[in-house]
Amino acid sequence: MHDSLSNLSSGKTFKKKKEVKTLYHLKAVGLVPTCKGRHACKSFPSLQVWYQFFSTATHTLPFISDGFGNETRRVDIGHLFQSCTKLHHAKRLHALLVVSGKAQDIFLSAKLVNQYAYLSDVSFSHRTFDSMPRKDVYTWNSMVSAYVLSRRFREAVDCFSQFSVTSGLRPDFYTFPPVLKACGNLNVGKKIHSWLIKLGLEWDVFVAASLIHMYSWFGLISVARKLFDEMLSRDMGCWNGMISGFCQNGNAADALGVLIEMRSEGVKMDPITVASLLTACAQSDDSISGILIHLYVVMP
């Protein structure tokens, strides 16, 4: 009898410690108000039913519904992320992941970083990122992209620098397009370009398109054109980047020249190409080319 009571007491103590630890995590990322002592755990059971806000589905996340283990349901985490259309939705999902013990999953934490950024609260992206005990390349990429999405370009570059210097991880080709977009001056862009060359990623089509955009933005259209000409293969992003680069720098004739090259290689225009080219036609007062492009758009 004494052993049974001892085990029961030990179990309750373990559960209490787990609840306090979970609440500490929730407070650390700002998901619940700061509270003290025994009053903290009183707020914990309410978190057990937060999941009811969302639709339950297939088979991803087992979760106890009433706090006493009487009923277990499964919640589709992917569906929960899709359901988060407002900031308080994302915070509830975040709390659910903490309570269920899933918040330490690197992939799910990175998704939270992205989710908060999409909902225009990069501060919670940053808190989530900082609370992660382990980070991989995808996580760092998510944080850099979150800053860029929020137009906090200086912080995006600083995050990239920290990633490159202190993480011990190797950036990949997903890292560079957003950070190149965030470059506030040409010297930083050139340093990142040098880093790309060292990593052997310069000729990835996504990275090359971003380099073309960057050099065009800083007015170095000849450098952009040289990169474009040296590419072994091009996708629509590269073609559009070169056309829009010429348009940005007032070179409408060269933009239309790239169109001729593109058509000679059998590449069809997309809506982005058309928008850039119509701008070029307006700049050069070339109404004939504008009419032909318009006909291309309306013809089946």
Image (cartoon, rainbow, N blue to C red):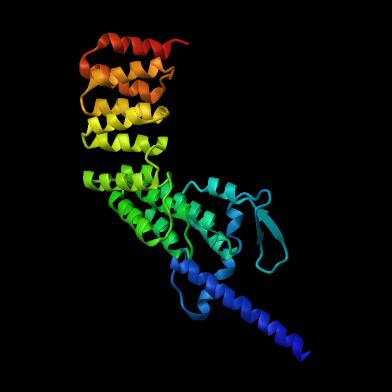
Measured from the top left, where is residue 203 in percent x and y? 39, 37
The answer to whether 89 is drawn above or below residue 186 in the figure is below
Q: How many marks?
A: 0
Relative horizontal placement of residue 253, taking residue 199 as reference (left or right)? left
Q: Along the horizontal axis of the image, is 300 left or right of 231?
A: right
Q: Nearer the viewer, residue 139 or 20?
A: 139
Name the residue: 31% across, 55% down: 158
Q: Is residue 170 above or below residue 223?
A: below
Instruction: State whether residue 88 appears in this view.
Output: no
Where does residue 145 sit, x and y in percent of width and height? 39, 48
- At 30% from the left and 11% from the top, the residue drawn is 289
Residue 252, compared with residue 187, is above or below; it is: above
Residue farthest along the bottom direction in this orientation: 2
Give me the residue at 28% from left, 52% from top.
154
Task: Give the x, y percent position of residue 40.
Answer: 51, 75
At horizontal 31% and vertical 24% (from top left) the residue drawn is 276
- Expressed as whole percent of the image width and height from the top left, the position of residue 48 reads 60, 64
